Image (cartoon, grey):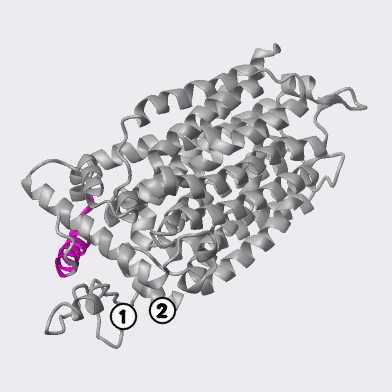
Amino acid sequence: MSLDFALIVSEAQSATAREHKMTTWQGIRLYHKAIAWSMVISMAIVMEGFDNALIGSFYAFPAFQKKYGQQFPDGTYGLTAPWQAGLSGAMNAGQVLGLLLNGVISERLGFKRTMLAALSANIAFVTLLFFAQNVQTLVAGEILLGLPLGIFQTLAIAYASEVCPVVLRSFLTIYVNLSWVIGQLLALCVLKGLIDNTTEWSYRIPFTIEWVWPALILGVVVFAPESPWWHVRRNSPQQALASLRRLIGKGAKVDFEAKETISMMFHTNEIEKEMSAGTSYLDCFRGIDRRRTGITCLITTSQALCGAGLMAYSTYFYLQAGLPTQSSFSLSAAQYGIGFFGTLLSLLLVSYFGRRTLFITGLSMLAIILSVIGFLAVGGEGRSISWATGCLLLVFVFAYNCTVGAPGYVLVAEMPSTRLRSKTLVISRVLYNILCIVNSVIIPYMLNPTSWNWKGKTGFFWACLCFLCALFCFFFLPETKGRTYGELDILFERGVSSAAFKTTVADPFRHALDGCTSEKPEPALRPETGTEEENPTV
């Protein structure tokens, strides 16, 4: 493949136009291998969702409470609020370290080798949890397990966003969230089947699943292709082309299109090198990338502060709301099933309504639901109030996964520049995990009857934060639907306001071709309709 700049621009222009014309079905037929590999990588996220739901549900699990907790004055067993906070926050603390580690090693070693190392570490660290004899060992094991889980968080999103065309980007990044929900649902189903088991195997069997799952994925990832974008960033066109060929169908025409797609990647990479030469963590806070990093962090902050932390404590929340243990586990299992279908529905909603509208509307809906939960708690206690609170939390889960949870994964994948994507995702997820650590500290105090004992009134606190997040997103969150990475680079480089992203026509080739041809070319892409005044070109 020639590295002549004029040829690269011409081929990149053709590839960009083709991506805009590509239908969903065409994308599936051409990139069916990329879809399969992305789904395999994303399945590692199942273990994060599994462990997250596992620990939160263990607090209402009789055998676990007796083994690792203490006896209360009323004769029951359980973990005190400080140990609940420490155990819940341990994995998040480990994930912060894993995220920071991933930002460095994934760009040096590549996504594939980093994933293989993380899967191996996952298998090793689960051993500590399985053989833990006290709560202190559990905390240490959760911290260590958080290291590979932190790597999975951003690596799966980055890989999914780099191996597929624009038309499939939302589907594969949403699948990352779907994998997380699958993990939670799996954990609740396993625990519900073991709740009547009074032996130590009732809480050790769930840990064995965390051995088997990553081992199966590791055996497949060994054969996975590397992201072609990673090879492009390392200036290795032939390796990039070889990776792309493994991700798409076969044929002469396909081979020609693959070369054009690599040219588009190189052109986008050159645009970003001109805008920001560095690729360090500090470069995420310089120039144009400072805004992109800020918006990415706003998205993950909204996901952490919208009350979603209650989902990890749903079983315990239902118990404190007055529901029996079996009903609490049943509602929790239903909760993750509803979350699964909510995530599937988001695949359609994000394509129809776009990212910005769906995200802001969702935050507003969540604020209303949480407020109603709070007002129900003010009204008093009783069986009807308890069930109404439980049902509203199920509605909350459905709305969250439809509008904020899954679409948020799409937004964070599209917002950073390609050269700084891994590090920007790491920064945003570190912030998210820090907030989750705070949540894991304060939520047990909010719900624990020996501490603040807010019960349903907890909804008021999260409703206020949720409303503030919606307000900030209204002013700062841009629409990224249907944009190539090159177009997003131009929109950010020109300083287009967030509200104008949707209607502004972006042409990443306009100025590049000026230096290669004698005549100024017409703008290659005008996906929006309307007059030049209505849809300015940048």
CB under 8 Å between callouts 1 and 2? Answer: yes
Label 1 crowd bin: few (<14), some (14–19), many (20+), radius 10 Å:
some
Q: Is residue 55 magenta?
A: no
Quadrant of res 448:
top right
Q: Tell me if residue 331 comes above or below residue 432 in the rendering.
A: above
Residue that appears at 52% across and 22% down: 211
Point out residue 528 in the picture as x, y percentages from the top left corner. 26, 74
Q: Is residue 18 magenta?
A: yes
Point out residue 244 in the picture as x, y percentages from the top left corner. 23, 46
Label 2 crowd bin: few (<14), some (14–19), many (20+), radius 10 Å:
some
Q: Amino acid at mark 1?
A: Val
Q: In which quadrant will I find the N terminus?
A: bottom left
In the displayed structure, does residue 171 sit left or right of residue 363? left
Residue 496, which numbered label?
2
Residue that appears at 27% across and 72% down: 508
Front residue (pair 315, 425): 425
Which residue is outermost to the bottom?
533
Residue 302, which numbered label?
none
Q: Tell me if residue 249 comes above or below residue 191 in the rendering.
A: below
Point out residue 504 in the picture as x, y percentages from the top left corner. 33, 78
Could one spot residue 59 in this view of the protein? no
Front residue (pair 35, 65): 35
Q: Main secondary structure of the magenta part?
A: helix
Span highlighted in magenta in the image = 6-24
Which residue is outermost to the right?
73
Q: Earlier in the sequence, mark 1 or mark 2?
A: 2
In the displayed structure, does residue 18 sit left or right of residue 361? left
Front residue (pair 3, 381): 3
Could one spot residue 41 in this view of the protein? yes
Q: Tell me if residue 143 comes above or below residue 170 in the rendering.
A: above
